[in-house]
Structure formats: C-alpha cells, structure tokens
Amino acid sequence: GKASRGGQMVSGVVQTMGNISTSSKKISEITAVINSIAFQTNILALNAAVEAARAGEQGRGFAVVASEVRTLASRSAQAAKEIEGLIGASVSLIEQGSEEVIAAGSTMNEIVDAVKRVTDIMLDIAAASDEQSRGIVQVSQAISEMDRVTQQNASLVEEASAAAASLEEQAARLTQAVDAFRLHDTGATMRSSFL
C-alpha cells in the first residue's frame, strides 16, 4: 500500500544521498589538486620575481607578469578553500540528511509492519464477527423454537384446562344423579316400614 511505497521512496532517497556524498568527496579531491597547483604556481612566481629583480631594468616587465601570476595563484587557492568549505558543509548536511532519511526509512518499515499487524487483526475481527453472526442466527433459531414449544405448551394447557372443566362438570352431574338415587331409595325404605 501507501506505506510500502513510502518505504521504497525513502530507500531511493538514501541511495541518492549516497551518490551525492560520493560526488562531493570527488570534488573535495579536485579542490585539493587545485590548492596544490596554486601553491606550486605561487612558488614559481616568487622565484620568477627574484630572477626578475636580479635582471634589473631588463627584468622589470617579467616582474609584473610574475606578480600577476602570484595574484592569480592566490585567488585560485582562495577559491579552492571556499569550495572546500562549501563542500565540507554540504557533506556534513548530506551525512545528517542521510542519517535522518535512514531513520525515516526505519520508521517507515515499522509503520509498514504496524499496518500489516493491524490488517491481520482486522481480518481476525472480521472472521470473529462472521462467526458471532452465525452464532446469533443459531441463538435466534433456538429462541424461535423455544417460542413455538411454549405456544404449543400453552395450547396443551388450555386443552387440559378445558378437559378438567368438562370432567368437573360431568362429576357434578354424576354426584347429582347418585344423590337423587339415594333420596328415592330412602323414601322406598320408609314406605315399607309403614306396611
């Protein structure tokens, strides 16, 4: 994803920084050569000035040229020193930048790992939610079954209650019939004793 691309970009920047650092070191080597040439030119110009002074009037023109050469050598040396200073500062900044980029690269790798872990956790949560959803469906089915059984039981209780009421009514009628029979039987006994 984006985090992975960020990691690759940081790696590219680290490599570029390394290339710049290498180029800076080469420039430093070149300025060292310029410094050396300027130093040698300065010595040659000094020798030429000494020889011109010995030559007297005839060497005056040559002395002017030698002086100009010395000035140019001095300027070259100064420019080389400035370049060296700038390169030194650049190398220092590049090294600092490299360290920061490497640190950023390390952080990006940690972010990539963290994102992967979060993705795995999200997948686990999704799987658990799916399982939980199936469990809820099963519980819902069980509750529906319990409700059906409860309604069936209620219906059976109503039927049993109606049957009990009917039985009670029939028992009452039977009791009345038996009582009537007893009364009739008692009357017959009394009549036979009068005879």
Image (tube, grey):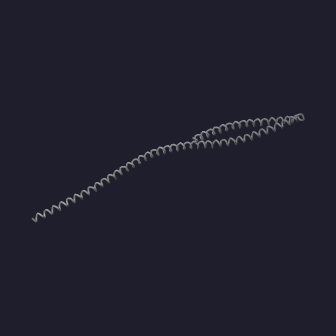
Q: Quadrant of residue 46?
A: top right
In the image: residue 32, left or right of residue 110? right
Q: Nearer the viewer, residue 58 or 118?
A: 118
Residue 101, position as x, y percentages in the image:
62, 42
- Residue 186, relative to residue 156: is it above or below? below
Q: Nearer the viewer, residue 138 or 187?
A: 187
Q: Residue furthest right?
A: 57
In the image: residue 164, left or right of residue 122? left
Image quarter where the N terminus lies is top right
In the image: residue 15, left or right of residue 122? right
Q: Quadrant of residue 169?
A: bottom left
Q: Residue furthest bottom?
A: 194
Image quarter where the C terminus lies is bottom left
Q: Residue furthest left?
A: 195
- Residue 192, relative to residue 69: is it above or below? below
Q: Residue at x 72, y 41 (%)?
A: 86
Residue 39, position as x, y percentages in the image:
77, 37
Residue 93, position as x, y percentages in the image:
67, 43
Residue 26, position as x, y percentages in the image:
70, 36
Q: Quadrant of residue 63?
A: top right
Q: Residue at x 43, y 46 (%)?
A: 137
Q: Residue at x 72, y 36 (%)?
A: 30
